Amino acid sequence: MAVLLLWLLAGLVTPSFLTLGQVRNVVQVAAFLGVVSLGQTVALLVGGIDLSVGGVVTLTNILATSLMVGQDSRIAVAVGVSLLAAVAVGSINGLVVALLRVTPLIATLGMNAILFGAALFYTGGAPNGGASPGFAVLGQGHLLGVPASTLCWLATAFVLAVALRRSLFGRWLYATGANPVAAHLMGVPVRAVLVTSYVLSSLLAALGGLLLTSYIGNPSLGIGEEFLLTSIAAAVVGGTALSGGVGGVLGTVGGALFITEANSFTTIAHLATGAQYIAQGAIIAASVLIYSWLSPGGASSSLQP
Amino acid sequence: MSTHDSMLPRRAMLGLGLAATAAAALPLRSARADANVIANATIAASPQMTSGQRFKKSGKLRIGFSNGFSGNTWRTECLASLRQEAANRPDIADLIVVDGQGSITKQVNDIGDLVTQQVDAILCIANSATAVVPALRRATREGIATVPFNLPVEGEDWCAYVGTDPTKKGRMLGTYLRDALNGKGNIVALGGLPGNSYTAACWAGTQETLGSGIKVLAFAPASWQEDKAKIIMADWLTAYPNIDGVWADGGMDSAGAVEAMLAAGRKLVPVTGDDYNGILKLHAKQQASQPDFKIGLVSEPTWESVIALRTALDLLAGKDVPKQQTIVPQLITDANSTTYIKSNLPDGVYVDTTLSDAELAKLFR
């Protein structure tokens, strides 16, 4: 609802915001943040947080471009290695949090630094390579007028939403996030759930990184930084609590769309650079406030994947 | 000018407000690949000099370089040129490179560490124009030759500064864009990191020269990143049906803007930027089918580090050096782009470099 409201409001200020082309722009670009935020939502729901998503996006971008080197025949290798790397990163995050009991904030922040360092080390600061023409379709192509990246995002969100709502794992995830001790007593394999959640988070960050790589085609060492906090913002704007166990995937889809919309709106409206940032921040903060007012009982209105 | 620089200005510097100065080209030093690049460049020296008497050292020299951060290709090439120059100087025993990792505090500590290690000279690309001032002052007082470069440092408590003048660069870009549009049309502008002083000075210089016939539709910071620039430009293309030119102070921004125009099926227009190989390659690829696609690029020499090192070594030899040296950048347009483009090297290469193509290929392996 907030998404539509902002769109309408933006349309009143700058009519071009309501054109089909602009809507298409926003949903295409929102897909990158959207997919990364889906992973962040899983990490938040299980009671953790994943600050390594930025590092995963950067590493994915570097790995994918350097392995693909512009050739369609190498797409499978590039995508495969990127996803495997993400599984490895997520497993380590999960094990450090679940077994060594390191606070998720610190564990994943440390991982984020390690990943950026790894990307720097791997490239020597001079990245080479690029996406192939076939791979570029994913981020730049359209199917029946809808951007391919948007379709990937929505499909992923749908599958994840169903999985969290219908599967046993989904119930375990919410139970663990709400109260890990109680979940353990009920027989939930808390550690396995934690590790799986961090793997999912990393995998989705890598998928977002692949979409972004496809959109831009080039390696860039700074590409993932912005996702670290905006992915959390998207989840929280969408109603997921930082305390775990509360929230859902579909809200995050709206949250990512909302944040991208806000950025896009401030770009188009005639605002000075400083004002653009102030407006973006104010819109996001206001949306969370309004959301908490509208939802009766706040945290108790849980379970809405 | 500004007192609070952005955390991570990629390669920025302030306007120096230099008076018109006599151009002093450096002597040709060797037959290496860099010889022509540097010898053909114009480097303006300030009339004010720093005496080398106090810094004179004998024997093997130890040089420290406090890099504000690493991780973009400009800095990578800059450091590679510095290492190459140092390796070619038998009087240098050690080049100690420390990385501030984008942190203002870490860089201040780094400089302190170099002083403790009693290096003979400190080169520095500052993360903040103000925060490193006390650290450099202390080093200079202890007899260490201090040469900040690329990004300016406030005050005069350092020995010598080497860089370009972003206001003048902005004037070059503005003049180019005005002429390319015959003095009339709508433009959009893409800057670097939000609030950085380099973009501010560059844009100010441009605005002096655009003239009344050019209307600026919008300005936004794209952080010198292709993905950000492409996303912003896509928004603008739907908002503004008539965009006749794109101003950018970085080639990554202009490349992203061109990608967005191509994706939207729009006719390409004149763009500005810097010596990023990616924009040169895009131009070469689209030139034939897009006659209005013109480029006006002003370089930021990646070999500023070499001049900074030579200046430090002059001081350590007891010679007087100019307080400020301003390198006049290269203007790359459709007329001369073929002499700069490196078609067989990655997009990320900055082409105003002392590194040979083979050395660049090895660096971007």
Image (cartoon, grey):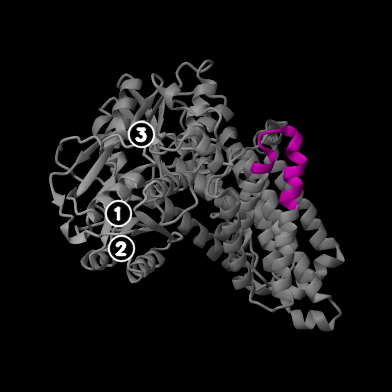
Question: Mark 1 or mark 3: which comes first in sequence?
Answer: 3
Q: Which residues are magenta?
A: A66-83
Q: Hey, what amino acid is under mark 3?
A: Ala
Measure the alpha-carbon separation of dots 2 and 3: 32 Å
Q: Hey, what amino acid is under mark 2?
A: Val
Q: Tag 2, which secondary structure?
A: loop
Badge 1 vs badge 3, beta-carbon distance below 8 Å: no
Badge 1: chain ID: B
Find residue A10 and report its horizontal and vertical position in percent. Answer: 50, 45
Residue B214 lies in quadrant = top left
Q: Residue at x 42, y 34 (%)?
A: B33
Q: Is any atom of residue B12 visible in this view?
A: yes
Q: Tag 1, which secondary structure?
A: strand
Find residue A263 and report its horizontal and vertical position in percent. Answer: 50, 48
Label 3 packing within 10 angstroms: few (<14), some (14-19), many (20+): some
Question: Which residue carries the number 2 mark?
Answer: B132
Badge 2 vs badge 3, beta-carbon distance below 8 Å: no
Res. B288 mark: none
Badge 2 and badge 3 both on one subunit: yes
Measure the alpha-carbon separation of dots 1 and 3: 23 Å
Q: Residue at x 67, y 54 (%)?
A: A205
A78 in magenta: yes
Label 1 packing within 10 angstroms: few (<14), some (14-19), many (20+): many
Q: Hey, what amino acid is under mark 1?
A: Pro
Question: Which residue carries the number 3 mark?
Answer: B35
Res. B148 mark: 1
